[in-house]
């Protein structure tokens, strides 16, 4: 019996666009998270504790226009931030850690997919899930407030609505890069979830210690820094002990630095270093 040589034939199909591959990653993350029990529980709990009460208050209480101070009381509370941290920890916990555990990078990067594209797809899915809690409900409540206001100063109300969109987008973006970074350093999603939450909680504990010497240390706490930033956006003022430049640098660094770290971490992982 003769041996037939292996022959290779050129593939005549069409290559999928990179954008389509990003969409597949994004869709997979989004659909998986919406079916997660942990995400569903936190969403329901968050809606009940944060958003529902504010919605009923706006509907039942007569108001002349949408005030920034009302939105500060609503979104500037520590409860909204704490629940956002918990949600981000659950959403991002397995985005990279599971790929590290089962070595599925081989599948992702067997195609012409860059680390940047991989991270964009993962982050986009997580950001969309976070927006369901951090952006859509506040914008909806602000819109209901405008629709039910008794005064005619709609210009001011729509200005506050625009600020609400900005606040929701910031809250959505703030925790995802850090969660991805923690997820990239472990192969177990439980460690990543706990690590993300405890890292932010640890900063709050440190602030409580150092704020005894100077209240300016409060800008290091994610809960305090976001609350102060929201008050600044809505009402144009910050506490006297807060340095505005330091506040912006802290908020920006907690977004940019983790994003840079996770990018280089994944680059090293892909090349096998």
Image (spheres, grey):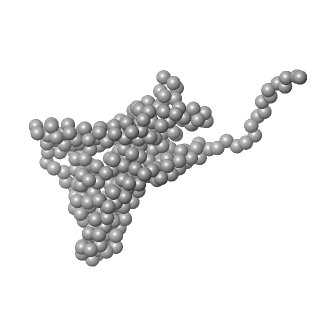
Q: Where is residue 18 in the image (x, y as percent from the top left)?
A: 59, 42
Outermost residue on the bottom side: it is: 150
User: Which of 199 and 169 lies nearest the eye of the viewer?
Assistant: 199
- Asked if residue 269 lies left or right of residue 4, the reply is left
Q: Where is residue 206 in the image (x, y as percent from the top left)?
A: 20, 37
Outermost residue on the left side: it is: 213
Asked which quadrant contains residue 80, the reply is bottom left
Quick check: can you spot residue 159? no
User: Which of 167 and 7 lies nearest the eye of the viewer?
Assistant: 7
Residue at figure coordinates x 42%, y 35% from the top left = 188
Asked which quadrant contains residue 217, the reply is top left
In the image, is residue 248 above or below residue 158?
above
Q: Where is residue 233 in the image (x, y as percent from the top left)?
A: 26, 54
Q: Position of residue 36 (x, y in %)?
A: 45, 50
Quadrant position of the N terminus in the picture: top right
Quick check: can you spot residue 80? yes
User: Which of 11 and 100 lies nearest the eye of the viewer?
Assistant: 100
- Asked if residue 250 lies left or right of residue 191, the reply is left
In the image, is residue 263 above or below residue 135?
above
Residue at figure coordinates x 36%, y 61% from the top left = 137
* Count of marks overlaid on the render: 0
Residue at figure coordinates x 53%, y 47% from the top left = 28
Residue at figure coordinates x 52%, y 26% from the top left = 271
In the image, is residue 100 above or below residue 239?
above
- Asked if residue 158 lies left or right of residue 241, the reply is right
């Amino acid at each position: 019996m003769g041996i037939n040589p292996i022959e290779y034939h050129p593939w005549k199909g069409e290559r999928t666009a990179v954008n389509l591959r990003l969409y597949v990653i994004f869709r997979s993350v989004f659909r998986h998270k919406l079916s997660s029990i942990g995400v569903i529980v936190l969403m329901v709990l968050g809606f009940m504790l944060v958003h529902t009460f504010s919605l009923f208050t706006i509907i039942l209480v007569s108001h002349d226009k949408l005030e920034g101070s009302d939105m500060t009381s609503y979104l500037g509370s520590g409860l909204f931030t704490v629940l956002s941290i918990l949600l981000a920890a659950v959403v991002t916990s397995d985005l990279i850690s599971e790929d590290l555990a089962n070595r599925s990078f081989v599948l992702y990067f067997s195609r012409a997919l860059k680390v940047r594209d991989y991270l964009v797809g993962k982050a986009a899915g997580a950001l969309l899930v976070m927006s369901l809690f951090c952006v859509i409900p506040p914008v909806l409540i602000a819109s209901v407030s405008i629709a039910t206001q008794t005064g005619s100063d709609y210009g001011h109300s729509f200005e506050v609505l625009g600020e609400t969109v900005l606040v929701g987008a910031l809250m959505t973006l703030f925790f995802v890069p850090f969660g991805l970074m923690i997820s990239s350093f472990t192969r177990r999603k439980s460690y990543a979830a706990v690590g993300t939450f405890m890292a932010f909680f640890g900063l709050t504990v440190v602030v409580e210690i150092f704020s005894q010497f100077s209240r300016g240390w409060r800008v290091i706490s994610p809960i305090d820094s976001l609350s102060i930033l929201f008050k600044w956006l809505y009402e144009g003022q910050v506490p006297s002990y807060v340095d505005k430049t330091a506040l912006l640098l802290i908020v920006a660094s907690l977004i940019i630095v983790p994003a840079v770290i996770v990018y280089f971490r994944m680059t090293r992982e892909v090349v096998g270093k």
